Image: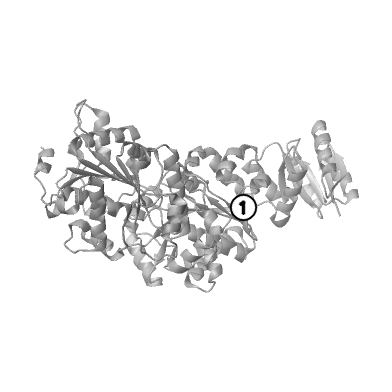
Amino acid sequence: MADARRGIVITVFSTASAVGKTLISINMAAELAKQGYRVCLVDMDLQFGDVCNYLQLQPQRTLTDAVTALETDKNSFAVQDFLTTYDRYDVPFGVMAAPLRLEEAYNIQTASVKEVLLQLQLRFDFVVIDTASMFSDINLTAMELSTIVTFLGIVDFIPTIKNMKSGHDSIREMGFDVNKIRMVLNRSNSKTRIDLQDVEQLLGSEFYHILPNDFGAAQRSIQTGCPLVLDSKATPLKTEMRNLVARYTNRPLEKAKEDSVSWFKKIFQ
Amino acid sequence: MAYRVILVEGNQQMLERLSGVIRSAREFELAARYQRAGDALGQGSVFKPDIVLVDIDSNDNVSLLEDFVATFSAASVFCLSDKWTPSDSEVIAKAGARGFLIKPFTADELQEAVATFAKTGISAGAEVFSFFSSKGKSGKTTLISNLGFSLAQKTGQQVGIIDADVQFGDMAVFLNVAPKTTILEAARDINFLSPVTLNGYFAPVDDNLRVLCGTSRPEYAEQIGIKNFTEIIAMARSMFRYILIDLPQGFNPISIAAAEASDVTYHTAMINGGFEIQHMQRALEIFKAWPDYENRVKTIFTRVSPCDKEERHKLSQALGYPVAAIIPNEYMLVSAAANNGQMAMRVEPDSMFAQTVNRLADDIIGKTHIRWGNP
């Protein structure tokens, strides 16, 4: 496996909660899967992750089980045994669920999680990681492994922007490659009196992509368990989410494969 | 007119050193000094002191504190010790002494001690309230800043806010202060501090309201040791009547330590159409490890609409746990206030937001009144 090809890792990070990380993560995973890529979505908001809530999944096995198995016997560890499949709308992708119990989440070891992520990279074209809003060992490890870090922000009020700025500065000073940090603005047209250009000036960089505010569509998605990109209803938010993924894959929307392939079941064999 | 000081210190060298400091301090005059407490008690009243400094490391001076307070009833009695401990603080407050100083002290520290304790005296132990949230964006910083303001206004007593959201604390922005020192420096220095000197690490916000701000950079968070952090809380108990602590999201060493050190932990969550009730239920399961969790853990929902009794009842039913308070959705008021470094309840004191925060303050004060036997 020395020359094994490793997949792309996209970490979705922010310095504030409730900015839409989980919604973006599940839509990225769904859009990539829809295009025929092998995709795994990892919920690394270990204590209060919402990936399975948003996708209406009831996982039988979680990251805790994966880590335990890995720590028990690395040689027989098969990461795919610990995934839950999302396969509604004929768009299958794997989900590594967050621990079910808080005490499991609290005691999980970063080194083991890193190994799980490396294993996932060997099996999937894309590994999308949803995170908790903090600089923790586990998040920094995910960021180090990542091909792209989607640093998600919203411009609602000054304290949020202050934290976006300090988080952005910290990431830069930690020595992460500037090219892999993509500042993405969510809910761009939400109620605010703050000028976007002022925020970009403060951050010292422009937003890589901008997602419009559509609270209603986001709520519908959460209630139905259907990612917006799989919903038949066209909305500006859906379009921009798909455009963001297209920019990451360098594949314009019209050229992306719309048919899902039968690779997924093979993974679990 | 200078303060007339009587100094009681058992150690001859320390007596000389402190005498020199007092003589050099502006607005202070050394009226008399003694190595033996008995001499001070028997003879000191001749000098009509304003301040009596009593070394409590020597002999049984602690047991004589009440005598000092009674004998020098027109003066303020301050205790001197090599090191501050929470138990000292309790004993001192019970005896009726006014304050505490670490020795040796400087002239500035003496002046600051008198200025600080002149207002309030040493506290016998503040009530500490932590604000926990499963995830961020719970509205707790807005709530704490306004609640602190309300408690200070209503009681006229000292209220301290500790921003322990160590990576992304926003309290300085909410309260519009530019702190010279933060929780980082306080944690670093705590072993050398006393309530007087720790007070200087808190930035003044308003009459009776001070804040110990969070770090200026997220990476500084890891430099805050848990032991030192809990020492800050313990020492702050002797400085304030109420302490409100803003915690980082989720369970982590800081939030657990603060909750353990608090009288009450408020689990705060914002209603946003997500899974906030389920998250709160999971967190409550952890808190149930405390035998007295029903008294120590309370819940608050913010951005509740409609914000009425019926909604509170519904939330309580859904949660399976009593809801202590609900705060209305007044986003434009709250965000405009935060953007301008103002307190929402000062901007619109008659708003429903202000009314609900005031009610929570009343609950806290009411509870306190019962505990402390005040009317």
Q: Residue furthest left?
A: A262
Q: Which residue is mark 1?
A: B203
- Amino acid type of the residue tagged 1 in the rendering: Ala
Instruction: Between residue B155 and residue B204, name the one nearer to us.
Output: B204
Vertical comparison of B261 with B358: above or below: above
| Residue positioned 50% across, 44% down in the render | B217
Q: Quadrant of residue A212?
A: bottom left
Q: Tag 1: Cα neighbours inside 10 Å, few (<14), some, or many (≥20)?
A: many
Q: Is residue A54 left or right of residue B346?
A: left
Q: Please state the horizontal and vertical placement of residue A63, each as a whole percent of the image.
A: 26, 40
User: Can the viewer see residue B98?
Assistant: yes
**Up-down relation of residue A161 to residue B306 (above or below):** above
Question: What secondary structure is marked by label 1?
Answer: strand
Percent from the top left, x then y, of residue A156? Answer: 42, 60
Quarter of the picture containing the N terminus of chain B is: bottom right
Is residue A248 toward the left or the right of residue A158 in the image? left
Q: A213 or B148, which is in the foreground?
A: A213
Of all chains, the one bearing label 1 is B
Residue A195, percent from left and from top: 44, 61
**x%, y% of residue A159?**
47, 56
Q: Which residue is at the far right?
A: B46
**Front-most of residues B296 and B51:** B51
> Seen in the image, is B154 located left or right of residue B330?
right
Count of picture labels: 1
